[in-house]
Amino acid sequence: MSWSWSQPTEATREKRIAADRPVYFISDLHLGDGTRSDIFMRKDRALLELLGRVRDEGARLVIVGDAIDFYQAWNLTSVLKAHGQLLRALSELADKNGVIYIYGNHDYDIALFHELFRWEVCSSLRIGPDIVVQHGHQFDPFIGPELQSSEWMTRLHHAVERVVGWVRMPLHEFYTPANRVVYWCFHKYWWFLKARSALARKVGLSGYARRTQEWVSYWVRSEAGDPMSMLYPALAGAKQLGAKTLVCGHAHMPGCMEKDGVQYVNTGSWTYGYSQYAYFDGDRFLVRDWITGREFGEELYRAALDGELVDIDMDRWWENQYLGWFRYRSAELRRQAQ
């Protein structure tokens, strides 16, 4: 099997399995080269423990995309050197229990997952009649329709990470001095964008101005509690697919909730300090962090579910968040609670 961003016509591969045994879901490992910009952060031992449980229970493992971060590592050799034991364990699990891999937006060459690690590769998985599993970038309003052109933005982001360290969203999770300054600078850049958009409208380029506003709104909504702005597109997509439950990764924010007759499950990620996974026992889903044991329901998505983010824009977000001297409300409140 061969597939890459240069061969998008081969991108649709659906697989179906019966809901006849437990299933564990992990996604967004982003295994890199083992350096400080490898956001998996050497949690190999913790994931090996989870794989041991999957093996002992005779359960299936579904990796919901973005297991290896080629944009960060640049080559497979460095990933194998940094995470060789973990990848060997995944290959062994594939032989014993079966591992299904659903490719994501970081997976620019799928052949190696199937041929080297012996994973079954697909773009969409249906479990029984009612459960659909996709990576989730399909519902991302920016990456979804512009998957090819989004690649350069991802590469640029990792280049910045290598130079200046953590520049990540959401701010309250990565409350570093560098990130706090970057957010302040981005707000000042927003002033420039507003002025440029106003000029664009005056000269008849309203489409260009609208695109700028959409991009900034996407960023703000992601920061405020709907990562990648994908929650409602995912709910709508589930209905189009005829699914009662949709399982995704991509957003890096775990949760399990129901809205408009659809159950939405997000597997979270294994980046930074997180070790999140979803589990289906044949009847119900739960989402947990492997290391801390914390269980996730709808709490992280509540603002999006309650409609609080509908009218939010950069000015409203900044007015609510910025406390002066590079301090931000949500992050300061979290710091006080710890």
Image: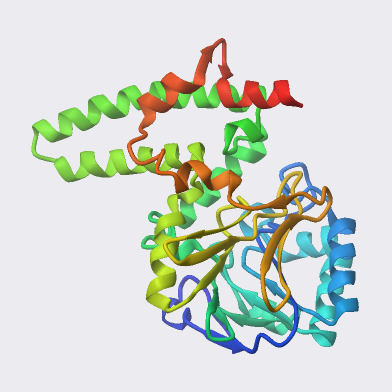
Q: Identify whether 171 is placed above or below 93.
A: above
The N terminus, quarter of image: bottom right
Q: What's the image's color scheme?
A: rainbow
* Residue at 70% over, 84% down: 115
Q: Is residue 148 visible?
A: no
Q: In the rendered view, does 40 fall on the left or right side of 150?
A: right
* Residue at 58% over, 71% down: 103
Q: In the rendered view, does 327 fall on the left or right side of 188?
A: right
Q: Identify whether 192 is placed above or below 69.
A: above
Q: Identify whether 287 is placed above or below 253.
A: below
Where is residue 48, by image quadrant? Answer: bottom right
Q: In the rendered view, does 205 fall on the left or right side of 8?
A: left
Counting from the top left corner in percent of width and height, residue 278 is at 69, 64
Counting from the top left corner in percent of width and height, residue 295 is at 73, 52
Near-viewer residue (113 or 300): 300
Where is residue 255, by image quadrant? Answer: bottom right
Counting from the top left corner in percent of width and height, residue 33 is at 76, 54
Near-viewer residue (240 or 80): 240
